[in-house]
Amino acid sequence: GNAGEPFYFWPLRVLWNYWIHPYQSLIVVCAIILVGYLVCRQWRKKPAFLRSALIVILPLQVILHLTLGVSFEFRVFAEVFPVVWCLMFQVSGVGRILFHGGTNG
């Protein structure tokens, strides 16, 4: 059968790889700052469900990435990408359509 992959606990290796690649790490940090700004802009006006989802999912995924992941492998955050996208580029009226059954009234 398929034995799967071994379980590696490498938090120092992950951080070390970010440290020894300063240019790539700088790009990552700048991207995180930009995305963070777009997500946090007008935070209180964003849907509570999306805010809660981000607050629950993102810290757990960051911890898992730093302890069990591989440096610069961001596909592990795939579960939080839709939440981040919706918080960055909130489309007005989507909540009204979803929760009230239409655009009128």
Image: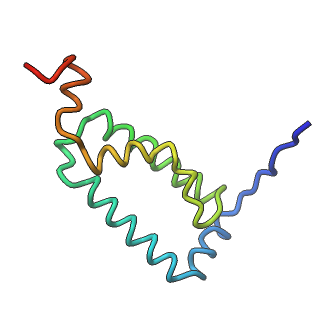
Coloring scheme used: rainbow
Residue 66 placement, left or right of 91: right
Relative to 90, say whether 14 is above or below.
below
Depth check: give the residue in front, 28 or 68: 28
Relative to 2, say whether 95 is above or below.
above
Depth check: give the residue in front, 64 or 36: 36
The N terminus is located in which quarter?
top right
The image quarter in which residue 92 lies: top left
The residue furthest front is 103
Q: In x, y percent, where is residue 96?
A: 18, 26
Residue at image location 59% in from the left, 52% down from the top? 64
Q: In x, y percent, where is residue 15?
A: 59, 71
Residue at image location 38% in from the left, 72% down from the top? 30
Residue at image location 51% in from the left, 54% down from the top? 62
Relative to 12, say whether 94 is above or below.
above
Q: In x, y percent, where is residue 29?
A: 42, 71
Total labels drawn: 0
The residue furthest right is 1
Residue at image location 31% in from the left, 41% down from the top? 51
Relative to 5, say whether 16 is above or below.
below
Q: In x, y percent, where is residue 105?
A: 7, 19
Residue 32 placement, left or right of 60: left
The residue furthest left is 105
The image quarter in which residue 94 lies: top left
Residue 48 placement, left or right of 2: left
Residue 94 placement, left or right of 71: left
